[in-house]
Amino acid sequence: MDMNWIAIGDISDIPLRGARCVKTPQGKIAVFRTAENEVFAIEDHCPHKGGPLSQGIVHAKSVTCPLHNWVISLETGKALGADEGEVRTIPVLNEDGRLFIALESLMMAAE
C-alpha cells in the first residue's frame, strides 16, 4: 500500500532538541528534531494524563512529558522505565531537509 506523504515544512522549522505540532484530522502530531538532526513524529499526548509531549524536553531519542516526567521513546512511542503505555508513531520522510509525514498510517490506526 502506498503511503500518503504530506509535506509539513523544513527541518530548519524545528529547533534542535525541539518540536512543532502538526494538526491532522486524527489529532495533533508532534514532530521532534534530536540533537543529531534525526526527526521523529508521534501523537502529541502522553499516554499517562494526555500531557503535550511537544512541550517536553528532548534528550537522545526520547522526550520527557512536561506534566509528570514520563519518558517516551521517539522511536517506538513506548513509555520507558517503570511506566507503561504508548503513543502511535508516524513515519517521517526527510528529503534534503524537507519533511513529510505519512498520514496513511494514521488512517489505518484510526479504523
Image (cartoon, helix red, strand yellow):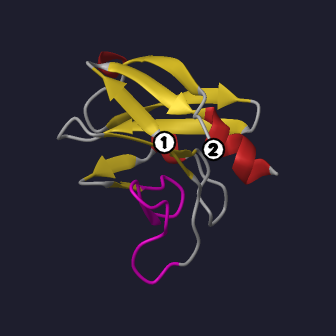
The residue at 48%/69% (across/down) is 79
Counting residues from the N terminus, which is met first, the one under dot 2 or under dot 1?
1
* Occupied quadrant, residue 96: top left
The label shown at residue 34 is: none
Q: Residues within 10 Å of mark 1 (few under 14, many from 20)?
A: some
Circle 1 residue: 91
Task: Identify the main secondary structure in magenta.
Answer: loop
Q: Is residue 70 shown in magenta?
A: yes
Residue 25 in percent (x, y) is at 76, 31
Circle 2 residue: 105
Q: Which residues are magenta?
A: 64-83
Horizontally, residue 16 falls left or right of residue 6, namely: left
| Quadrant in which the N terminus is drawn | top right
Labels 2 and 1 touching (C-beta < 8 A): yes
Report helix, strand or loop for mark 1. loop
CA distance separating discs 2 and 1: 8 Å
Up-down relation of residue 6 to residue 40 (above or below): above
The residue at 72%/48% (across/down) is 108
